[in-house]
Image: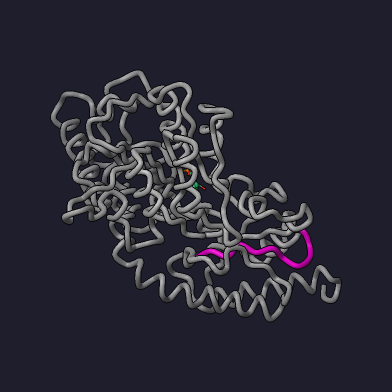
Amino acid sequence: MNRYFDHNATTPMSAAARSAWLEAAERHWHNPSSLYREAGFAKQKLEEARERLATLLGCEDAERVVFTSGATESNNALFSSFAQSLPKDVRIAISSIEHPSVREPARAAFSNRVIEIPVNADGVVEPERVRELIEKESLALVSVMAANNESGALQPWDEIAKACETAGVLFHTDAAQWFGKMGQGVTAFCRQPGEGGKPSLQHYITGSAHKFGGPKGAGFIVLREETESLRFIRGGPQESGRRAGTENYPAAEAMVTALEEITPRLDEIAVTQQAHRDEFITAMKQSFPDLRIISERAPRLWNTVLMVMPRHENLKWLTRLTRRGFSISTGSACSSGREGSSVVVQALGASPQELKRVVRVSGGWEHAREDWLALADAFCQVDQELAGRSS
Ligand code: PLP
């Protein structure tokens, strides 16, 4: 039985990614920037991995792809470089439900020139609000995540991106939770049919390998244009001078292999897993009629349920479920262990008491119906235990 329900925090490495990593580490461990033959092979494989990722994302030019150590680095790098390249007095807008790896660097770089875009009652950013802001505030940049890590709510990033493009505003989307879960539209990240069917959409995209079966410590940035000469990390010519440091070819290889392997399977997985997830919700509502599911009416990732439990603090649920072998979370990965820290539930205006009762369940690609139902059953047992009705 698979009792791991914290896939939005991290996923196990897929078999394909693991063997790709091993082969790359055994055969091509040389420094890709060195000048001898073996190093040249490693460099060539690294560039092939870049091409493959670009193709998967619908990018015309692989030079738009920069390999990094993950989405946190990618988001930090972008906001620091925006702060240097944009005029000093511009304002930027980010959604009120961004991951801390967007929110904190945005604030550090632009301080009180950051405007927060509120979400509606379903935890979704409305493109109309973004259009209003663009008109009113003469923004230079908008950043809205593709899928929320806590609630799973899908954000209309493509519509917002188009609005930004029309207005000449830069757009960034943190797609760390989208890749590996949403099959349709992966290529749409770089390429949208514009007028006359031409690819038109060009914006910044960030992603993270360990959310889709790749290794930890690997991620990427897709830049708006292949010619951008940004310097995220200084100290060497690697990644076209954008990110210095010896390239981690095995991690890049494993990351791209994981995404290539999972993406074509995702539409089918989504149908099966969403049905299991919805059965879990039905079972939970039978046991807990006052259960509140966040973003329930919004289109959301097929694997995620963010709940405000009707009673008992989240750490009590978490520790007792752990004893039964189930891994769940109290909200976002970065804040697990800290009570009441759900950014989304706070953005929706919850009471401090409700914030302490937030739990997140996030399933994987291979869960069986029985796994989900066993989890619902375990919630029931824990409730009885906490009520002192059973041992
Ligand atoms: N952005 C989102 C939406 C995330 O969910 C996460 C991880 O939880 C990150 C960024 C950070 O990713 P990484 O662990 O690769 O730094």
**Magenta stretch: includes residue 83:** no
Residue at image location 69% in from the left, 63% down from the top:
308
Residue at image location 57% in from the left, 62% down from the top:
122
- Left or right: residue 62 compared with residue 361: left
Front position in the image: 108 or 253:
108
Give the residues drawn in magenta, as a range: 303-313
Residue at image location 85% in from the left, 76% down from the top:
389
Image quadrant in which you'd find residue 165: top left
Most distant residue in the front direction:
136
From the viewer's perspective, is residue 4 above or below residue 220?
below
Task: State the quadrant of the C terminus.
Answer: bottom right
| Colouring of the image | one colour
Is any part of residue 11 visible from this angle?
Answer: no
Most distant residue in the right direction:
388
From the viewer's perspective, is residue 355 above or below residue 285?
above
The spot of residue 72 in percent (x, y) is 47, 38
Most distant residue in the left direction:
37
**Magenta stretch: includes residue 310:** yes
The spot of residue 358 in percent (x, y) is 68, 58
The spot of residue 359 in percent (x, y) is 66, 60
Residue at image location 71% in from the left, 79% down from the top:
287
The spot of residue 151 in percent (x, y) is 56, 59
Number of disc labels: 0
Most distant residue in the top direction:
235
Is any part of residue 302 visible from this angle?
Answer: yes
- Left or right: residue 335 compared with residue 164: right
Image quadrant in which you'd find residue 115: top right
- Left or right: residue 311 compared with residue 164: right
